[in-house]
């Protein structure tokens, strides 16, 4: 008997991957009464499950359905289309960022994880301030005294925020080896965050930029804890490259406390991501993993961070190690993923 199968994918960028799998079997002219009848399955990839049957309808051409009703193919197909349409409308209208916002989402095959991959190119446009509004955003410069074991470290930072009202969230921006807080201003991330209604604090890490007169070789996790306590914030932490030496031990030395220490985490190919492999699965911290497709460190960090229970993967096509600042196009993609991730954390 010939088996025919056809796979359909509903291609709405606002939906999860949605499979419509139609299995039919040809009947010979003298089909036995006990022969298996055609079966229509709607399959969905959702949550922690793959190929989960959410609807199963048997079509009987010459027999009564189990319910006692006689069904024919047009009626059954109409019912299936109605159910599928309802599912699509429900998902498009009610699921948050991690499940919608025009994201091409692929659930992890690992049991119990909520790892998703997003297609940044297919995300909708994000709010962009006009030039005048961008220039009008005030960026303050200041220093904060961070005391550790009797030593005071004067840490320089730049800060922006909404012109009025209470900020939705606070974002703490670290930097890589070759950069400082100034670079977040140059690519307008500080300005965009303020325009979107967030408070943003970009620091110069000890030994860099305007904090070059102080160093913290050890106890970087302790430094982060003291810094965040002094700033009196519970932030979303953005950590590119070298700054992973600070952010990762702070968040994952004790993964049970990561949600107490931060609202969310955005690693951008940070160094040392392999040092906490046994800790990631114990953290429920929402994480947006950003990396450039041409960066070996980034690809490896992506593989490591997939162990995080609530991680979303965003790759910058053709991006290098500093994919968020490679060029204007890559920065736009980074800002797009950043906007939708932060928006999801508001709920």
Image (cartoon, helix red, strand yellow):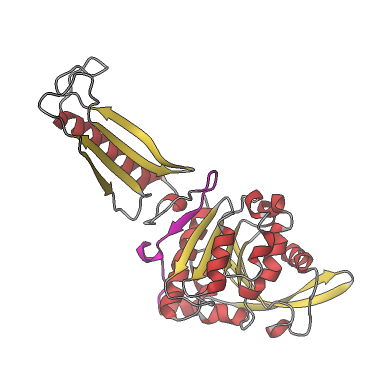
Of all residues shown, which one is farthest toward the left?
Answer: 29
Residue 4 position (above or below residue 224): above
Quarter placement of the N terminus: top left
Q: Residue at x 49, y 43 (%)?
A: 48
Number of residue marks: 0
Q: Residue at x 14, y 20 (%)?
A: 62
- The quadrant in which residue 33 appears is top left
The location of residue 14, given as percent across then percent down, is: 35, 53
User: As rendered, which of 7 and 192 lies closer to the eye?
Assistant: 7
User: As rendered, which of 146 and 208 lies closer to the eye?
Assistant: 208
Of all residues shown, which one is farthest toward the top?
Answer: 68
- The quadrant in which residue 176 appears is bottom right
Magenta-colored span: 110-130
The location of residue 142, given as percent across then percent down, is: 69, 78
| Image-based side of 42 in relation to 302, left or right | left
Residue 159 position (above or below residue 73): below
Residue 116 counted in the magenta span: yes
Residue 132 visible at all: yes
Q: Assign the magenta stretch its main secondary structure.
A: loop
The location of residue 255, given as percent across then percent down, is: 69, 53
User: As rendered, which of 115 and 337 lies closer to the eye?
Assistant: 115
| Image-based side of 105 in relation to 220, left or right | left
| Image-based side of 113 in relation to 99, left or right | right
The location of residue 85, given as percent across then percent down, is: 27, 40
User: As rendered, which of 39 and 198 lies closer to the eye?
Assistant: 39
Residue 232 visible at all: no
Residue 319 counted in the magenta span: no
């Amino acid at each position: 008997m010939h088996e025919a199968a056809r796979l359909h994918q509903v291609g709405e960028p606002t939906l999860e991957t949605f499979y419509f799998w139609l299995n039919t079997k040809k009947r010979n002219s003298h089909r036995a009464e006990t022969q298996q009848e055609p079966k229509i399955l709607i399959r969905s990839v959702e949550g922690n499950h793959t190929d989960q049957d959410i609807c199963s309808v048997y079509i009987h051409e010459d027999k009564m359905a189990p319910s006692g009703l006689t069904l024919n193919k047009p009626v059954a197909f109409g019912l299936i289309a109605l159910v599928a349409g309802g599912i699509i409308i429900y998902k498009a209208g009610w699921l948050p960022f991690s499940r919608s916002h025009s994201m091409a989402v692929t659930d992890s095959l690992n049991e119990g994880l909520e790892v998703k991959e997003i297609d940044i190119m297919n995300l909708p446009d994000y709010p962009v301030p006009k030039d005048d509004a961008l220039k009008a955003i005030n960026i303050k410069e200041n220093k904060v005294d961070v005391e550790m074991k009797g030593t005071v470290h004067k840490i320089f930072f730049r800060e922006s925020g909404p012109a009025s009202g209470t900020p939705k969230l606070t974002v703490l921006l670290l930097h890589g080896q070759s950069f400082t807080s100034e670079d977040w201003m140059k690519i307008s991330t500080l300005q965009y965050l303020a325009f979107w209604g967030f408070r943003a604090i970009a620091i110069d890490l000890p030994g860099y930029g305007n904090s070059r007169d102080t160093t913290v070789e050890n106890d970087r996790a302790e430094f982060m804890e003291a810094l965040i306590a002094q700033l009196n914030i519970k932030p979303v932490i953005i950590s590119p490259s070298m700054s992973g030496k600070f952010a990762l031990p702070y968040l994952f030395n004790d993964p049970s406390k990561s949600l107490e220490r931060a609202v969310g985490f955005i690693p951008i190919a940070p160094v040392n991501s392999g040092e906490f492999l046994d800790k990631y699965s114990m953290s429920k911290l929402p994480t947006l993993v950003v990396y450039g497709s041409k960066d070996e460190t980034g690809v490896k960090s992506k593989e490591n961070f997939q162990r995080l229970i609530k991680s979303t993967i965003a790759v910058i096509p053709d991006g290098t190690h500093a994919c968020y600042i490679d060029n204007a196009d890559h920065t736009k993609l980074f800002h797009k993923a950043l906007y939708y991730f932060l928006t999801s954390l508001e709920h």
